[in-house]
């Protein structure tokens, strides 16, 4: 005879550490000791005071059972407020945030006191929906406690979660928007730089087809924005919470822990998107773009990608203004990345700019060794120094870039930027095939990026395949002529290696006119092509510009800097590049 399972109604609290693997990679023993202290000083006393039962601890999380929804939610609020207070002023490597989910439902109890079943599963899914430092609860919990606690609830709508067939009605607990009992000494935790909540796009016409298209476009646009830059932190805004955004942007921003909100209207042939400062409600940026027919998926994807890229640039401009207005001592690691990006327009001296970038980014990594934006930013800064500092060892810099980007792709392998820079580090260390594979991975993640397409083409040229690269670069330029500076300079190199000197000069001059005036990548190729054509005066003028930027450059030095280049590239350079540089008068060295 089968014994019926022991069931009961219980309030279940599930808590989990945000970024646990990141913390343990940095310092596993220190992280576990820190979490034990938080358990002993914050979590366990709250559980005991509210008569909860700790069912299990998994190292990075806890499962707790309470007799009432009121007790479970009071415990969650007490824990999150205590952690917010502990985190104030803490270094990034000592800051611990939890996500907490609370459900009221049926559980099965085994003989050893463990609990299972639908009630536990839903609580775990609610925990995953909570923002860092926040609490997400089921509608049943809200119905039991509404009006009895000093918090507000933001309706997150019905959520479809993994392994639960029915939709779950969820609410975000707005601790910061409480009715006055939060400790006065505990100001809200500092929000992450470049954090944005994306509201569902609104169909401007009451048409079922357009409504369906708005849902799909929202999902695609949110994913594109998240992939458009490693610095951007994107949070989807649930429909019910988005309904509050026009009138209560600050409440929505607090509930999701984001600085900015993205809103948009979809029309049959156009999309209008705007960025709002969540704290003030001020509109910072807007853009309207024409959309092709829904059947033309590739064209629509390219249009959405362009809007996402422009939106990211607008957010960065706003964040630079905000961050530079604050004391440097208060900068978070990600804000250090923003400061480093600001130097592109505030520091005209390339060497000073590179040195200050590296200082800011090394400081960010000293405080948070797993900060992916800082890892990527430092790798890019070192890549720039490779072209600017003739005294630096490019192989040593490339090895450091490889270490940084290897860690970045391990921490975030769905971000195209990490793979893009990783491919550059691989080719600089002589790993040509791996570089092409990493570049192809970046392009698969974001196939509508002309920058990634031109980078992959440039790597193809560096691997000694200029004819193949030329076709790819010409396609990238035709697809996105507004952003053709980088592919144009690489097209200059491809033409030079093919012996198409006139085409090389034209491409190089166009690249320089568009702002791609890198002396090592563009200037030298123009010099060699002009000299090969016998245009002596033009070659001399171009060489003079290169040597003003890179005094002391010689052919031997250029060879040394490219000593790990692909043998086919070296062969073509010996045939077309170096003879042209000799004719122009660049010293042999």
Image: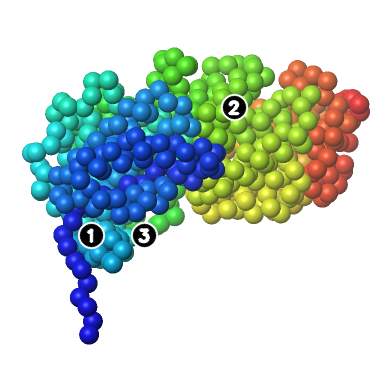
Q: What element does badge 1 sit on?
A: helix
Quadrant housing residue 184: top left
Question: What is the CA distance from the residue labelled 2 to the residue labelled 1?
Answer: 46 Å
Query: Could you tell me residue 523's position as x and y percent?
Result: 73, 29
Marks 3 and 2: in contact by CB < 8 Å? Answer: no
Q: Earlier in the sequence, mark 2 or mark 1?
A: 1
Query: Could you tell me residue 326's position as x and y percent?
Result: 41, 16
Q: Earlier in the sequence, mark 2 or mark 3?
A: 3
Task: Give the mark toward the camera: 1 or 3.
Answer: 1
Question: What is the CA distance from the residue labelled 1 to the residue labelled 3?
Answer: 43 Å
Answer above or below: position of 475 versus 367.
Answer: below
Mark 2 is surrounded, within 10 Å at the Cα level, by few (under 14), some (14 to 19) or many (20 or more) other residues, namely many
Answer above or below: position of 378 versus 302.
Answer: above
Marks 1 and 2: in contact by CB < 8 Å? Answer: no
Q: Is residue 581 visible?
A: no
Task: Give the mark toward the camera: 2 or 1.
Answer: 1
Q: What element does badge 3 sit on?
A: loop
Query: Could you tell me residue 48's position as x and y percent?
Result: 24, 42
Is the C terminus in the top left, top right, bottom left or bottom right quadrant? top right
Answer above or below: position of 551 versus 4.
Answer: above
What's the mark number on residue 194? none
- Please state which of residues 267 and 569 is positioned toward the viewer in this rendering: 569
What's the mark number on residue 362? 2
How is the rendered protein coloured?
rainbow
Which residue is rendered at x = 17% and y = 62% of the image? 8
Q: Which residue is mark 3?
A: 295
Is the N terminus in the top left, top right, bottom left or bottom right quadrant? bottom left
State left or right for residue 314 relative to residue 558.
Answer: left
Q: Earlier in the sequence, mark 1 or mark 3?
A: 1
Q: Is residue 587 visible?
A: yes
Q: Which residue is mark 1?
A: 119
Query: Could you tell me residue 77's position as x and y percent?
Result: 23, 37
């Amino acid at each position: 005879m089968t014994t019926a399972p022991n069931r009961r109604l219980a309030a279940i609290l599930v808590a989990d550490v945000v970024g646990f693997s990141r913390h343990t990679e940095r310092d596993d023993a220190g992280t576990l000791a820190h979490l034990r202290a938080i358990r002993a000083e914050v979590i366990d006393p709250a559980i005991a005071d509210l008569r909860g039962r700790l069912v299990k601890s998994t190292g990075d999380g806890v499962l707790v059972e309470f007799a009432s929804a009121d007790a479970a939610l009071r415990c969650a609020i007490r824990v999150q407020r205590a952690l917010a207070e502990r985190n104030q002023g803490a270094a990034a490597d000592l800051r611990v945030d939890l996500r907490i989910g609370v459900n009221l439902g049926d559980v099965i109890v085994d003989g050893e006191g463990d609990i299972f079943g639908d009630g536990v599963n839903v609580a775990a899914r609610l925990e995953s929906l909570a923002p860092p430092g926040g609490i997400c609860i089921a509608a049943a919990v809200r119905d039991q406690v509404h009006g009895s606690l000093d918090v507000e609830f933001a309706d997150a709508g019905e959520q479809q979660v993994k392994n639960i067939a029915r939709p779950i009605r969820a609410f975000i607990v707005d601790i910061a928007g409480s009715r006055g009992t939060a400790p006065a000494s505990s100001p809200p935790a500092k929000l992450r730089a470049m954090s944005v909540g994306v509201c569902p796009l609104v169909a401007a016409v009451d048409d079922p087809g357009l409504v369906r298209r708005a849902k799909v476009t929202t999902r695609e646009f949110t994913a594109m924005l998240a992939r458009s830059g490693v610095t951007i932190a994107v949070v989807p805004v649930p429909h019910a919470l988005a309904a509050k955004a026009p009138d209560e942007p600050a409440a929505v921003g607090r509930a999701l822990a984001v600085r900015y909100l993205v809103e948009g209207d979809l029309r049959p042939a156009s999309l209008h998107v705007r960025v709002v400062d969540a704290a003030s409600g001020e509109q910072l940026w807007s853009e309207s773009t024409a959309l092709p027919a829904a059947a033309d998926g590739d064209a629509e994807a390219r249009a959405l990608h362009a809007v996402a890229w422009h939106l990211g640039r607008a957010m960065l401009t706003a964040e630079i203004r905000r961050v530079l207005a604050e004391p440097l001592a208060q900068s978070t690691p990600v804000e250090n990345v923003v400061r480093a990006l600001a130097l592109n327009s505030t520091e005209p001296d390339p060497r000073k700019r590179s040195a200050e970038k590296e200082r800011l980014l090394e400081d960010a990594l000293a405080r948070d060794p797993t900060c992916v934006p800082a890892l990527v930013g430092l790798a890019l800064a070192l890549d720039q120094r490779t072209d600017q500092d003739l005294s630096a060892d490019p192989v040593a810099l490339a090895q450091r870039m490889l270490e940084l980007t290897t860690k970045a792709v391990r921490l975030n392998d769905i971000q195209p930027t990490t793979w893009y820079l990783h491919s550059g580090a691989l080719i600089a260390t002589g790993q040509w095939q791996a570089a092409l594979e990493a570049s192809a991975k970046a392009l698969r993640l974001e196939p509508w990026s002309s920058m990634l397409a031109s980078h992959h083409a440039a790597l193809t040229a560096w691997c000694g395949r200029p004819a193949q690269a030329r076709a790819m670069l010409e396609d990238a330029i035709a697809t996105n002529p507004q952003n053709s500076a980088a592919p144009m300079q690489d097209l200059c190199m491809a033409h030079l290696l093919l012996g198409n000197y006139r085409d090389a000069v034209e491409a190089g001059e166009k690249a320089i006119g568009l702002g791609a005036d890198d002396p090592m990548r563009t200037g030298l190729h123009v010099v060699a092509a002009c000299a090969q054509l016998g245009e002596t005066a033009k070659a001399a003028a171009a060489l003079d510009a290169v040597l003003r930027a890179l005094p002391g450059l010689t052919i031997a030095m250029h060879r040394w800097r490219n000593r790990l280049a692909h043998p086919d590239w070296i062969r073509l350079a010996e045939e077309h590049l170096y003879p042209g540089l000799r004719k122009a008068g660049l010293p042999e060295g």
